[in-house]
Amino acid sequence: MDFSSWIGRTEVCDDNLDPGHAQRVAWSLDEPWGRLEALPLLWHWAFFIHGEPYARLGRDGHPQQDAFLPPAGDRSRMWAGGRVRFHEPLAVGRPAQRVSRIADIVEKTGRSGLLQFMTVVHEYTQGGILRITEEQDIVYRDPASPVLQGTKPAPVAMWSRAVMPDPVLLFRYSAVTFNGHRIHYDDRYVREVEGYPGLVVHGPLIATMMVRAFTQAHPDLTVQSLSYRGLRPLIAPHAFQVGGCLQDGGTAQLWAEQDGMLAHQGEIRFTA
């Protein structure tokens, strides 16, 4: 399908960054709750949500007809990766706005067939100040068996944290992000229709866990930017590890691994 006419389309979403919802996000991520002044890194993904009525949802629980993104048809829509720049923290309990724009749509051929990659740019402002700039890579994939193998062994980590993605964690994260995609909570659907061996861990959740492991290991460093991408799905309820290593020039490599093999990768730029 030709989606070139969608390039440049914009969407505006306002949010008050409700403290009660921030508390629910903390519980979903098993974080200790205290009155937050600012959202921790990547928690903004649980806010600025435009929902769709049931009549606009596809069989997979994703919006089939979206007021902003092109229609998915019978293809799967997945979050492949992205880049985030953190200018200023978003303050909890204050009005903020996200302006989104479809920047590019490119067609490629991958291991699973024809793919269309869409780049969406988001700008988050609060009090007239640009707080976060983000580019998200969204992929439209024709129906095909999922690719679960073929990645490289994980490097030796300087820090590492284990994550147990049980169904309750996946359900709660789906709930706080208003994500209806059934691959994250409907075991029968994900096995019989999508062909996965179990529930699929959310890409944004994995990125959040990777960044959290970094900030816990280096509380004195300030994250300036993050780039990340998914290599293959992580399947629940098998444990996975998030870790990384520092490099020269104020950068750190991040990754998520399962059974010693890479599943997601990322890079952080930071200042002391």
Image (cartoon, grey):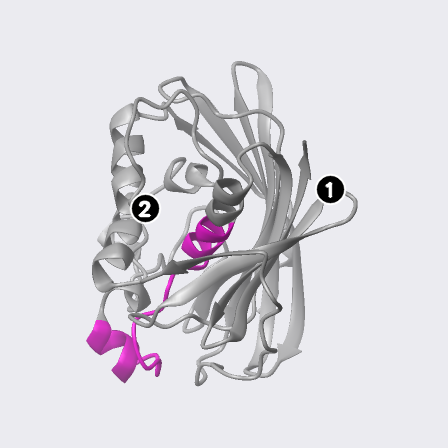
Q: Which of disc 2 and disc 1 is earlier in sequence? A: 2
User: What mark, if any, has residue 29 been given in the picture?
Assistant: 2
Viewer-nearest residue: 248 or 76: 248
Identify the amino acid type marked 1.
Gly
- Seen in the picture, residue 5 relative to 222 is either above or below; the reply is below
Q: Residue at x 41, y 52 (%)?
A: 66
Assign the N terminus to one quadrant of the image.
bottom right
Q: Is residue 20 visible?
A: yes
Q: Which residue is mark 1?
A: 250
Viewer-nearest residue: 201 or 242: 242
Viewer-nearest residue: 47 or 259: 259
Tag 1 near tag 2, CB within 8 Å: no
Q: Is residue 6 visible?
A: no
For mark 1, give the secondary structure. Answer: loop
Image quadrant in which you'd find residue 92? top left
Q: Position of 221 compared to 12: left or right?
A: right
Q: Quick check: is 105 in the magenta stretch?
A: no
Image quadrant in which you'd find residue 59? bottom left
- Quote the CA–CA distance across marks 1 and 2: 27 Å
Q: Position of residue 29 (x, y in %)?
A: 32, 46
- Seen in the picture, residue 25 relative to 75 is either above or below; the reply is above
Q: Which residues are magenta?
A: 187-210
Identify the amino acid type marked 2.
Leu
